[in-house]
Amino acid sequence: MNLTILFGDEKKELQVNNDSTKSLLEFLRENEISIESDCGGIGKCDKCKVKIVELSRECRACELKICNLSARINEACNTEVEGDSKESATIDILKYRFSSDMKIEGADKSITDEASRRGPSDCCEGAMIKGREVALAIDIGTTTIVFALIDDTGNVIDTLGMTNSQRLYGADVISRIKVATSGKRDALRECIVADLTQGIKEICTNNGTGISGLNNIVITGNTTMCHILMDYDCSMLGVYPYTPVNINTIVTDTQKLLGFQEDIPVIIPPGFTTYVGADITAGLFYIEKDNKETYLLIDLGTNGEMVLVNKDRILVTSTAAGPAFEGGNISCGVASISGAISHVTIDKTGMVSFETIGKSKPIGICGSGLLDAIYELRENGYIDENGLFIDKYFEEGFKLYGGIRISQDDIRHFQMAKAAVRAGLEILLQESNLTYEDIDNLYIAGGFGSGIDVKKAAGVGLIPRELLIKSEAIGNSSLGGAIKIANHLMDGINKYTFDKENVNIEEIDKLTSSAREIDLSRHYEFKEKYMEYMYI
């Protein structure tokens, strides 16, 4: 059968075996046609919806077998003459096409500015650095990947961001774990290796240096992302007691890890636990406060990680917040890419004004825009404290622009994410015998954390109102920590005599060795607090 695939203004012709038992979603992925599936292809998110033009029928690509498509097309044609079957079908991809080559905001300006203050400012973004030694910091997020090129003084020379193409297999770490353990671990690893290869080559080429000019590469990410990159077995990450293969410091090289001809040292910092990984370790290293301050670090992404530092004591925990903060499982949700609605205001008359990333035409709404919209809807009486729309908007949702709207399900996904994070935060304080007054600072990190309005975050109950004046959105602290580590290692690494057995970052080892984990899934009060903070 010949399939004509329509996506936006583009069209692609493909040949498929009529008897194939593969789903249409699998077939499209294999043919490098990017189609979203936040739920990982289990039929829950509706992001993979397509229209079979000949049948005037919509369905989920994950639920449609190729063999069934062929049968339905022929049945609809009412063919009676043998051999006169319909040999073509047209598939229109309805949802916004999520492309792995879409660029995001590279790195938070606050992060790169802070890193640059550690050295002389003789470098500017995009400077040609041929012949000079540089290092590369990379943060692998579940949704996005960010690269930062630095010189030997710690100056950030350039940054680059892209979407994590693994997102085609699901928007959160739980979906990725399920996919990895269902026989597609190699496919996930191929995605991340291709992304890293593209990003490394691009940022080096853009700045006039070869890969051979890199002194070291530091990669951070959550434990699942690091396991997939290292080709570790992920099966125990999603099953109690959630045992990782390895969360210690990993030292390898670009030949072994990525198949490069160049042999550049690659360092992945240690993690705390299965769900509080190297990205959080790097984040704490970035903040690096003295022992006099008591502070909270919350990384708001698909897996909400929280750390409470009280002098030399560290408590860590995490909660499955889900991908709502990064646009996942949201009807018109997208990552923080150009055209994403990032800030929203709504007045009493229903008039909407908004900002988009890159000031581009709106294509969807990202996490910070969703938070703004829900705050505004509550403030202006369009939803009640339970998150329920008034009758006028209950069925169709609230329109922001064109076909972009907030649905009742979108609000529910956000409520579940914010309730999980807030409940976890309250339990950390409780386990430490601390009150809001004891906290000196609350740092909000992550791609979502870099763009939020903290006042509105407090308004919807994501963070305590009592900590509002102590709250600071610090952006991608994981990347900031990776930058500091890469700069720190440049003094001690001679890549030509590199001893992989003797890389030691004492400051980071101290962080991970002094931590205690709170398991929220087994905490007796978590469910009660979770329900309490569902209210808006």
Image (tube, rainbow, N blue to C red):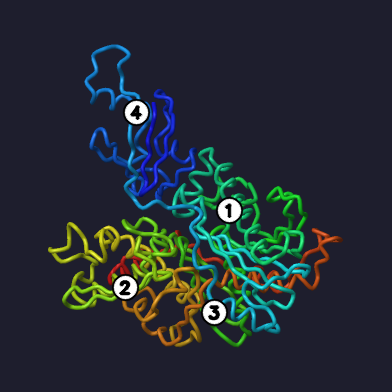
The residue that mark 2 highlights is: 354
Residue density around tag 1, few if under 14, some if 14–19, many if 20 or more, within 10 Å: many
Q: Residue sitting at 38 percent across and 32 percent down? A: 3
Image position, residue 59 (x, y; %): 29, 40
Mark 4 or 2: in front is 4
Mark 4 vs mark 2: which is more N-terminal?
A: 4
Q: What residue type is labelled 2?
A: Phe
Between 396 and 208, the one lying in front of the other is 208
Label 3 – label 2 distance at C-alpha: 23 Å
Label 4 – label 2 distance at C-alpha: 43 Å
The residue that mark 1 highlights is: 195
Between 377 and 200, the one lying in front of the other is 200
The residue that mark 4 highlights is: 88
Mark 1 vs mark 4: which is more N-terminal?
A: 4
273 versus 129 height, above or below: above
Q: Residue sitting at 33 percent across and 26 percent down? A: 70
SS for dot 2: strand
Badges 1 and 4: C-beta atoms under 8 Å apart?
no
Residue density around tag 3, few if under 14, some if 14–19, many if 20 or more, within 10 Å: some
Displayed quadrant of residue 489:
bottom right
Label 1 – label 3 distance at C-alpha: 25 Å
Label 2 – label 1 distance at C-alpha: 31 Å
SS for dot 4: strand
The residue that mark 3 highlights is: 110
